[in-house]
């Protein structure tokens, strides 16, 4: 068998990819990294295995093809799969029959990370699986799954590593003059937003407490709208909205047409929302346009659990927070492509009808779906703290060295179990 050679492209902010590569090297494989900016270079410890890409993006496909063939790459490792360099890499890897290892934030976040072959989110193998197929693979046996801790670190770890990554791009990127970020704003603007968010964090906490108290003191029934980052790939690549304003307008319109007059609509922003979108003004304008301005409010970030304790329904595009909604047995309406968009537990009602008389989810079906994810593609830990990374690493390396992806492996074991059961007396 040919020696395995793992090529790493861009990973989550911080040292996770570098730490993972170190363990794969200890396991006897070769590793390489192509970096695209000074932030990539800073977090990669294995300098002898690092190759900078300094051309414009037009030269990327040819550069990658040559690199894959010359270095005899067998495996490609990505974080996310929609940014230009990763999308092109997936295409070429498929042509060359390479194994594509994709990491992503956990579908059951914040206590897990996702690991799949081929693609994640709207490109995940889960998109084509039914709950019945998952149940058939598991049979009557449910494996024990590890309990998650209270948390794998505070949000500021993520923000800090992002700020440090962009600092290196902003001030030490001279060797990568052709680098262009996959975001729509400049690196300077993104770095400024990170710093501003850190500075305003205490004020945002006070504002959130005030708005949350206002909601609870109202005594009203309320519907949650779980907003996502407008620049996140789940929103831009796996939904049909052109911008976040279109989704907000849809929610306000459906609420005005269908919700009882004594109900409220609450927009909860993403915990990492950095202010690049004027969300509060967009929400005010849309609510006023439909005559419900006095019944609509925005709450900035914060923990979702306490807000769901008294919510009536939830609406989102395709946020992973929808899984927390389903875990609690709440009605959920989504408007994007998602791995949990299964008819057993996600409503397909028109939004006005959903607000008026929401369809309840099949909680048994969701619990089986969740169990299947925990037995296959979800790994406890996180990318942004030492403890979280260690938890992922100790469980992921042997899985990456297997020839099958987590879902294929679960299916194979299921078939073996059926054969074994058939020959038992």
Image (cartoon, rainbow, N blue to C red):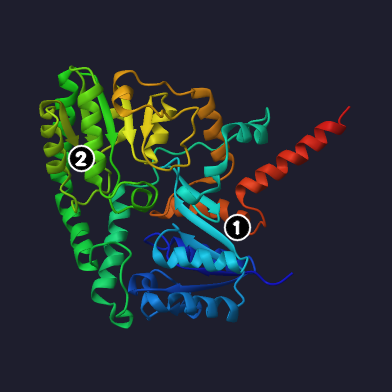
Residue 400 circle label: 1
Q: Is residue 3 left or right of residue 167?
A: right
Residue 285 circle label: none
**Residue 180 occupies quadrant:** bottom left
In the rendered image, the quadrant that contains the N terminus is bottom right
Residue at the spot x=71%, y=45% of the render? 412
Percent x, y of residue 77: 52, 63
Work out whether 417 lies above or below 391: above
**Residue 206 occupies quadrant:** top left
User: Mark 1: which secondary structure?
Assistant: helix
Work out whether 116 lies above or below 293: below
Seen from the viewer's position, the closer of residues 284 and 154 is: 284
Percent x, y of residue 341: 46, 36
Work out whether 261 lies above or below 85: above
User: Mark 2: which secondary structure?
Assistant: loop
Work out whether 207 lies above or below 102: above
In the rendered image, the quadrant that contains the C terminus is top right
Q: Is residue 78 left or right of residue 304?
A: right
Residue that mark 2 sits on: 300
Q: Is residue 101 left or right of residue 230?
A: right
Question: Which of pointers 1 and 2 lies earlier in the amino acid sequence?
Answer: 2
Residue at the spot x=54%, y=68% of the render? 92
Q: Residues within 10 Å of mark 1 (few under 14, many from 20)?
A: some
Q: Using the numbered discs, state the Cα–Cα distance from disc 1 to disc 2 in whole angstroms.
A: 38 Å
Residue at the spot x=33%, y=18% of the render? 357
């Amino acid at each position: 068998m040919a020696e395995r050679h793992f090529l790493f492209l861009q990973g989550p902010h911080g040292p996770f990819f570098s730490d993972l590569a170190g363990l794969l090297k200890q396991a006897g494989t070769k590793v390489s990294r192509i970096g695209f900016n000074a932030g990539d270079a800073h977090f990669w410890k294995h300098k002898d295995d690092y190759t900078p890409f300094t051309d414009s993006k037009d030269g990327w496909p040819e550069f990658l093809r040559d690199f894959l063939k010359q270095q005899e790459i067998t495996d490609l490792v990505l974080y996310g799969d929609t940014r230009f360099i990763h999308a092109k890499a997936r295409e070429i890897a498929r042509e060359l029959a390479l194994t594509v290892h994709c990491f992503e934030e956990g579908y059951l976040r914040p206590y897990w990370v996702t690991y799949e072959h081929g693609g994640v989110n709207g490109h995940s193998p889960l998109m084509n699986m039914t709950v019945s197929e998952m149940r058939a693979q598991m049979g009557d046996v449910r494996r024990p799954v590890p309990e998650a801790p209270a948390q794998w670190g505070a949000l500021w770890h993520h923000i800090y590593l992002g700020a440090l990554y962009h600092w290196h791009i902003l001030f030490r990127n001279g060797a990568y003059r052709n680098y262009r970020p996959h975001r729509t704003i400049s690196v300077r603007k993104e770095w400024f937003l990170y710093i501003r968010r850190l500075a305003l964090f205490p004020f945002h906490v006070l504002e959130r407490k005030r708005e949350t108290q206002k909601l609870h003191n109202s005594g009203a029934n309320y519907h949650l709208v779980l907003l996502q980052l407008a620049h996140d790939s789940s929103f831009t690549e796996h939904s049909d909205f052109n911008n976040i304003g279109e989704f907000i307008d849809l929610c306000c319109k459906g609420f005005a047409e269908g919700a009882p007059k004594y109900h409220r609509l609450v927009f909860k922003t993403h915990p990492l929302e950095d202010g690049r979108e004027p969300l509060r003004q967009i929400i005010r304008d849309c609510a006023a346009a439909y005559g419900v301005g006095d019944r609509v409010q925005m709450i900035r970030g914060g923990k979702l659990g306490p807000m769901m304790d008294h919510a009536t329904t939830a609406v989102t595009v395709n946020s992973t927070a929808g899984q927390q909604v389903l875990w609690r047995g709440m009605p959920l309406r989504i408007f994007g492509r998602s791995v949990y968009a299964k008819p057993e537990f996600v409503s397909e009602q028109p939004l006005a009808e959903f607000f008026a008389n929401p369809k309840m989810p099949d909680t048994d079906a969701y619990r089986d779906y969740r169990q299947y994810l925990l037995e296959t593609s979800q790994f406890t830990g996180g990318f942004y703290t030492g403890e979280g990374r260690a938890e992922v690493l100790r469980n992921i390396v042997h899985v990456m060295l297997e020839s099958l992806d987590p879902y294929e492996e679960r299916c194979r074991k299921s078939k073996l179990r059926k054969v074994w059961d058939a020959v038992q007396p």
